Image: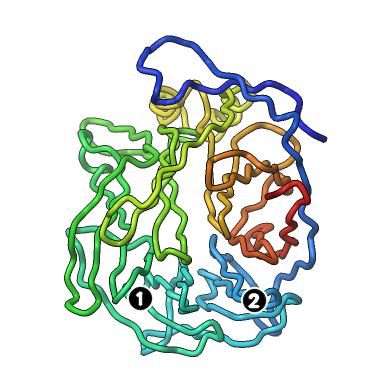
């Protein structure tokens, strides 16, 4: 059913006033659709899933790369879950221990970030091993994701947990340039990320949890331009940068936001210990962040909304930032990739599903 309710939205950064004015967005004319579930499976041949990773890659209309972190494998399967190729557990060349993120370049090279072995592995889209490299540690950080650029240039997305030890530090998302040829780091770009509520007792950290619904810094790789989209939900724009940190485009974003409800507050309170809740409650926003996950595919931005409802709502935007359609998924799933033909969905820890990506007649 189309949503004909007007939903309030904070005025964007263009409003310098600190007033409580809000902007209304009418979604009644935006077409909604429910992607069709094509298949689901909890194993590939004799390999059973235990803890599926939060990212997958659609390498063709009928082939997908998925990872299992607990069972320590990365596999290429067809759209029925039949095993085609497997990367095995180990510490040797071409072997992996813990793959959390993966990226495919414009040249169809698949990059795996193996946090267990602290290395980056490269494969073709048939999972034939090409090469690997082990970047030297960067100032106490850990690599979260790898975004390849031109001529051996990369952007590494990094994280650090210094903020847990230092009350004065905020949680940050760190981007650093890396050159594979000379194995050197370059310039650094730092932005605020979703905060943690930290509880201290006698100056000692005794509890920390990510603050749900608070503003977050989201990223999506553009393999077509070998560039990176960055969307800070506290701002009203998506910025595209290349591996030299030059700005390629800025897209205005105008999405609905919703006030944190009493029911949601009660649910959060029930999940925290009393002392940690005292800290957490002081961090919680009045209005929920307008997006939770972010993908880019074929001139479309896909943004998971935090709006309440019986299903998970994704806003699909064109490159001008206009909402052109709304996709509905089951409420508690996690979308893991979006390709032209299909959408990867993690139904739970052990079950993966493919949904059909449908282009509506109303799209340009």
Dots 2, 1 in contact, CB < 8 A: no
The first of marks 2 and 1 along the sequence is 2
Q: Report which residue position mark 1 lands on.
A: 120
Q: Look at the numbered disc 2 and give the secondary structure of its residue.
A: strand
Residue 209 in sight here: no
**In the depicted structure, whether residue 207 falls above or below residue 146:** above
**In the depicted structure, whether residue 215 falls above or below residue 129:** above
> Residue 244 location, x and y as percent?
26, 60
- In front: mark 2 or mark 1? 2
Front-lying residue, 150 or 145: 150
Front-lying residue, 242 or 81: 242
Q: Assess disc 1: are there few (<14), some (14-19) or many (≥20) residues with their C-alpha within 10 Å of its C-alpha.
A: many
Front-lying residue, 300 or 258: 300
Residue 114 in sight here: yes
Residue plotted at (57% across, 67% down): 56
Residue plotted at (43% across, 80% down): 96
Q: Marks 2/1: CA distance?
A: 23 Å
Q: Is residue 231 left or right of residue 46?
A: left
Q: Assess disc 2: are there few (<14), some (14-19) or many (≥20) residues with their C-alpha within 10 Å of its C-alpha.
A: some
Q: Is residue 232 left or right of residue 56?
A: left
> Residue 349 location, x and y as percent?
62, 61
Q: Look at the numbered disc 1 and give the secondary structure of its residue.
A: strand
Q: Is residue 269 left or right of residue 132?
A: right
Q: Quadrant of the N terminus?
A: top right
Q: Report which residue position mark 2 lands on.
A: 60
> Residue 97 location, x and y as percent?
43, 76
């Amino acid at each position: 059913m189309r949503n004909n309710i007007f939903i309030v939205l904070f005025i964007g950064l263009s409003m310098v006033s600190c007033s409580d004015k809000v902007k209304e967005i009418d979604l009644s004319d935006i077409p909604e659709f429910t992607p069709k579930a094509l298949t689901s499976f909890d194993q590939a041949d004799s390999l059973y899933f235990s803890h599926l990773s939060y990212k997958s890659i659609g390498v063709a209309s009928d082939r997908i790369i998925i990872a299992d972190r607990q069972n320590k494998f990365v596999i290429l399967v067809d759209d029925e879950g039949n095993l085609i190729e497997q990367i095995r557990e180990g510490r040797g060349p071409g072997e992996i221990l813990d793959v959390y993120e993966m990226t495919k370049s414009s040249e169809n090279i698949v990059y795996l970030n193996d946090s267990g072995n602290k290395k980056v592995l490269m494969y073709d889209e048939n999972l034939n091993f090409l090469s690997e490299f082990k970047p030297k540690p960067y100032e106490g950080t850990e690599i979260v994701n790898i975004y390849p650029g031109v001529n051996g240039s990369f952007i590494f997305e990094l994280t650090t947990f210094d903020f847990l030890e230092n009350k004065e530090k905020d949680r940050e998302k760190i981007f650093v340039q890396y050159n594979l040829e000379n194995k050197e780091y370059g310039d650094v770009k730092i932005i605020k990320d979703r905060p943690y509520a930290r509880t201290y007792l006698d100056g000692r950290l005794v509890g920390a949890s990510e603050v749900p619904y608070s503003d977050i810094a989201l990223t999506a790789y553009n393999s077509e331009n070998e560039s990176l989209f960055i969307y800070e939900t506290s701002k009203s724009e998506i910025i595209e940068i290349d591996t030299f940190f030059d700005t390629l485009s800025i897209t205005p974003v105008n999405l609905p936001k919703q006030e944190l409800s009493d029911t949601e507050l009660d649910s959060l309170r029930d999940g925290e210990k009393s002392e940690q809740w005292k800290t957490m409650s002081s961090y919680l926003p009045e209005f929920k962040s307008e997006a939770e996950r972010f993908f880019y595919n074929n001139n479309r931005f896909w943004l998971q909304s935090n709006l309440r409802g019986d299903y998970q709502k994704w806003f699909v935007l064109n490159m001008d930032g206009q909402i052109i359609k709304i996709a509905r998924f089951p409420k508690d799933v996690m979308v893991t990739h979006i390709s032209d033909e299909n959408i990867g969905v993690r139904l739970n820890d052990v079950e993966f599903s493919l949904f059909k990506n449908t282009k509506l007649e109303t799209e340009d």
